[in-house]
Image (cartoon, rainbow, N blue to C red):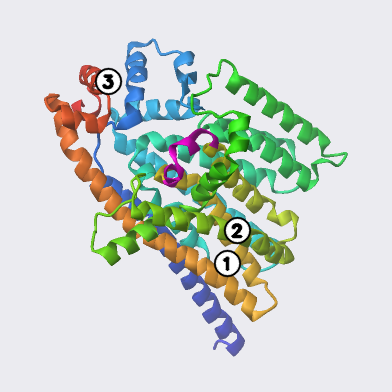
Amino acid sequence: MIAPNQAHLHHTTTRSHLAQAALLILALIPPLYVIILILTLTVDVPFADQWALVPLLQHAYQGRLNLGELWAQHNEHRLLFPRLLMLGLAWLTGWSTRAEMLANVALASATCGLLLWQVRASARRAGGAAPALAPILSLMIFSLGQSENWWGGWNIQIFLNVLGACAAILLLGAGEQRWGRLLLAAGCSVVASFSYSNGLLLWPLGAALLAAGGGWRRGQRRYLAAWLACGAATVGAFFHGYSWTSQTPSADAVLGQIGSYAGYALTYLGAPPVRGAVELVFSLATGDHRAICNLGDSDLCSYVNTAAIGAGLAGLALLPLAAWLAARAIGWRGLLPYLGLALYALGTGASTSLGRASYGMHQAMAQRYATTATLFWVALVALLALGGRHAGRAWARTACYSIVGVIAAATLLCTIKGIDHFRWQYEFLAPARQALATLDDEAMLQRLFFDTGVVRQGAAVLREYHLSIFR
C-alpha cells in the first residue's frame, strides 16, 4: 500500500511531467508550422539577391571558384560563411531554394535552444524552476512577422549571424572566463562578422561584457586582452580593401539629422511585435484583407510606423525596470547575457540607420530586420518572467506577466498576418517560375530580379548544370 505522502509526491511528479510535455508540444508548434508553410506555400526558384549566387555556382562546377569570390563585398557585408553554406546546400540538392529555407529553420532552432538554455540556467541560479517560457520564446523566434526571411533562402546570412551572436553573447556573459569558452565565443563572433556586417558589433560589446563580468581583474585581464586582439584582427580583415557604399553618411550629416536616425532605430527596434498586428487590425477594420505596409507611403504604413516607434520607446523604458526586478533574483552579473542580447539588437538598429535612414523610416519596418530586432524583445520577456517570478509583491508579478502576455499576443497576431505574406509571395512567384523555363515573359522575369538580363544569363547556367528548376 502506498503511503499518502508517497502518493502525493507521485501525483505531483506526474503533473509536473505532463506540464513539461505540454510546454514542449506547444513550443514545437511554431517551427513545425513554418516547415509546413515552406513545403506547401513557397516557390522553389531563385529570387532577388539569390541570382548573385549563380556565378559562384558556375565557377564551383567549373572548378575555378576562388577565395576572392567568397570574400567579395556584397552591399555592406562580407558573406563568407553564408556563401559557403549556400554553395554546399546547392551542391547537395541541385540548388533547391527550399533547402536554404529549411536551413534557416534549423539555425533558428539552434538559436531558440540556446536562449531556452540560458533562461533555464538563470532560473537555477535563482534557486527556482525555469519560467514556462518555451512556447512564448518559440513563438517569437519563429514568428511569421519575419516571413521575408523564411521564404527568402538568401537571408540565411541573417539567421547565421543571429545564431553566432547569441552563442557569443551567452558565452561571454557567463561569468569568469576560460580559454576554451573565450575561443569558442571568438569563433562564433568571427562567423557572425563574416555573415552580416553587424556582427562586428560583437567585438566592442564582448569587451564590455568581459569587463562587466570581472575582466578587469588581475587573473582575467589576459582574456580581455586576447579578445581585443582577435577583434582588431577581425575588423582589420573585414575592412581591408573595403568600399564604402554611397548610402554611408558623413558624421556631420548624422549630427545634423540625429532625430531621423534615432527615429529609424526606434522603428527598427519596435517593428517586430507590432507590424503584422497593426496590419491585421487594419485589414479587419477596413475590410481590405490585402492591406500590407510594403515600405510605401500610405495610411497603413504611417500607423505601423507610429506603433513601432511607440513600441520601441516602451521597450527601452521597460528594459531597466525589468533588469532591476530580475537582478533581485539572479544578481547583476546574471543580467549580462540578456543585456548583451538587447544591446546587440539596439546597436544593429542604430548601425543600420546609418546606411538606410535616407530611404525613410518605413524601410526600418522591413521584415528581414525582425530576426535581429527580436533579440531585444526576447531579452525583455526573459527578464520580466524571471523578475516577476521572484517579485515580492503580487502587483509586480501581475504587471510583469501581463506585459509578457501582451508581447506574446502581439507576436501571435503578427504570425497570423504573416500567413497572408506567405500566400501573396507564392502568388507573385509561381507564374514567374513558369516563365523562367521559357524566358518568354519579360514582366514575369522582372518579378525574379529587376534586371532580366541577369535572369536570362543565370537561366543558361542553371540549365547547363541542371540546377534549380532545371534539375
Residue 450 drawn at (x, y percent): 27, 28
Callout 1 secondary element:
loop
Span highlighted in magenta in the image: 354-365
Crowd around label 1: few <14 · some 14–19 · many ≥20 (10 Å) = some
Determine crowd level at label 2: few under 14, some 14-19, many 20+ residues with C-alpha closer than 10 A.
many
Spatial CA distance of label 3 from label 1 is 51 Å
**Picture disc at residue 454:** 3
To which residue does mark 2 refer? 119
Residue assigned mark 1: 131
User: Mark 2 belongs to which amino acid?
Assistant: Val
Q: What element does badge 2 sit on?
A: helix
Q: Is 358 inside the magenta-drawn segment?
A: yes
Where does residue 462 sit, x and y in percent of width and height?
24, 21
Of the numbered discs 1 and 2, the one sitting upstream in the chain is: 2
- Marks 2 and 3 close (CB-CB < 8 Å): no
Crowd band around label 3 with a 10 angstrom C-alpha radius: few (<14), some (14–19), many (20+) = some
Q: Position of residue 471 (x, y in %)?
A: 21, 27
Q: Are marks 1 and 2 in contact (CB under 8 Å)?
A: yes
Q: Secondary structure at mark 3?
A: helix
